[in-house]
Image (cartoon, rainbow, N blue to C red):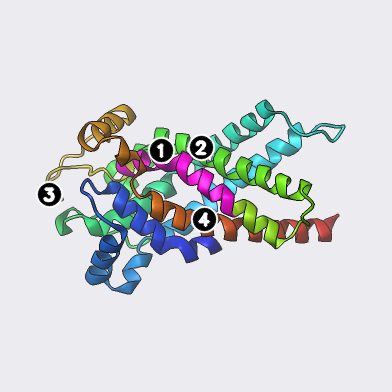
Amino acid sequence: MAASCFTHPIDLIKVHLQTSKTRTGALQATRRIVQEMGIFGLYNGLTAALLRQGTYTMTRFAVYDIAKDYMRHADGSHLTGGEIALATLLSGAAGGIVGNPAEILNVRMQNDQSLPPYMRRNYKSAVHGLVAMVRDEGVRSLAIGLAPSLIRATLATASQFVSYDTFKEWLLNAGYPDSVSVHFAASFAAGLVATTVCSPADVIKSRTMAALRSQQSAVGAVLARPPSLWRTCSSIYRTEGLRAFFKGWIPSYVRLCPQLVITFIIYERLRKSYFAHYS
């Protein structure tokens, strides 16, 4: 949550780029947001982002560590590739399910300003957005985009946690002390891996969750079913080409790199403080 407060403006610009069906640069998107809403427009949807971190990310961290501890070998040997894959799958699936409502709100609130005024949802906060979704679209709306969200959560866990643990172990085995510098370098490298691996699923997820529930005006609109995963993928590929799946890669990395650096450094310090106090 601390990291999100720092990286939210970059995440907002990334969502604008991913949901745009025209070629738009990051600077152009930033200029448009600031012109329409002022500098604080870059923090539109921050409450949803914080809710997302408090559900999705917390669950992924917890389940991943619990799964690894449960499968830890009595002789102290490293977990096998299959065991790490299982921990990744479990934590990604759990995080995707628990965090999906907040994920929808995060995408919608960030993308709202790019819509025509009469099509905007105008959620005032994450709580207001949740109530409005259930009231206007039903409880099933909380599962919109769940399939790409689960895929992305699993890919994110594998590319972030596993690559971070791998890079950190390499550095420690090379003789570097377990310090903030090692955590910084490992998380920096993990950000590069995670951005590339997650980009296609991230684009599909953003498109699915941001999809308009109606092509009509907000007054008297008839709710439509959200597009399927296959339909979204084929539509993107057919109309925009393969490169569209990597839209927003640069702002994604610019956001994810400091996000992971701040997250893992704080996480490592909190974990060390916890074990030092309670062990």
Three-letter amino acid code of the residue under disc 4: Cys
Q: Which residue is mark 3?
A: 217
Q: Which one is closest to the eye, mark 3 or mark 1?
A: 1
Q: Residue furthest front?
A: 174
Mark carried by residue 257: 4
Is residue 117 in view from this perspective?
yes
> Which class describes the residues within 10 Å of circle 1: few (<14), some (14-19), or many (20+)?
many
**Secondary structure, magenta segment, majority class:** helix
Q: CA distance from mark 4 to mark 2?
A: 16 Å
CB under 8 Å between discs 1 and 2: yes
**Horizontal relation, residue 128 to residue 157: left or right:** left
Q: Which residues are magenta?
A: 188-207
Query: Sequence-wise, which precedes: disc 4 or disc 3?
Result: 3
Q: CA distance from mark 3 to mark 1?
A: 30 Å
Q: CA distance from mark 4 to mark 1?
A: 18 Å
Three-letter amino acid code of the residue under disc 2: Leu
Query: Sequence-wise, which precedes: disc 4 or disc 1?
Result: 1
Mark carried by residue 201: 1
Q: Secondary structure at mark 2?
A: helix
Q: Position of residue 206 (x, y in %)?
A: 34, 44
Q: CA distance from mark 3 to mark 2?
A: 37 Å
Q: Secondary structure at mark 4?
A: helix
Q: Which residue is mark 2?
A: 155
